Amino acid sequence: MLAQRKTGFLNRLYLIEIIQGLLITIRNFFFHKKVTLKFPEERREYSSRFRGQHYIKAVNEIENCTACMLCPTVCPAECIHIEAGEREDKEKYPVKFEIDVLRCCFCGMCEEACPKDAIKLSNIYEMSQEHRSVYSKDFLMEQRGNKS
């Protein structure tokens, strides 16, 4: 048989607990560090391991990618689509390289799988747009200079 605990009138009204909760709220509101940022002026600092917008590395304006198809193979979201072609020097290259950003989960597996270190994820996190976008090869090549 369970023993009945004697409770006073104040304990039954939860008045002490309500006052304790209000004191905690007041203390946090007036005396703790604020975490709100004024966005356009203040920017949040992320770690160096943050994975943001994609870009393709290039040497002498020619992409490092050899269209080996490892990145679309390893991509869990299946958001990378590549069409391969050949150059005069018998080297494969991507004729078409597209990333569907809304499907991408920014896991970084494409970056890890690439043997040529061609596809990278930058620390750019401002990617909001008005319409659904698929990043093309030209756009990904332009972004390499904006990788901050």
Image (cartoon, rainbow, N blue to C red):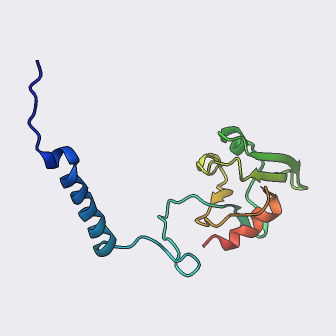
Q: Residue at x 69, y 45 (%)?
A: 71
Front one among 113 and 88: 113
Return the x and y of residue 129 as percentages of the image width and height.
74, 63
Foreground residue among 133 and 36: 36
Instruction: From this view, report whether residue 142 is shown above or below residue 8.
Output: below
| Residue drawn at (10%, 33%) of the image | 5
Horizontal placement of 19 versus 3: left or right? right
Taking depth in this image into account, of 89 and 79 the one nearest to the observer is 79
**Screen quadrant of the C terminus:** bottom right
Question: Farthest right residue?
Answer: 88
Q: Is residue 98 visible?
A: yes
**Looking at the image, which residue sits at the far front?**
9
Picture quadrant where residue 141 is located: bottom right
Question: Residue at the location (11% across, 17% down)?
Answer: 1
Where is residue 18? Give x, y as percent. 25, 55
Residue at (70%, 38%) from the top-left corner?
73
- Residue lying at the far bottom in this picture: please name it: 41
Residue 94 percent location from the top left of the image: 82, 52
Whether residue 112 appears in this view of the structure is no
Residue 17, compared with residue 126, is above or below; it is above
Q: Position of residue 13 (x, y in %)?
A: 22, 47
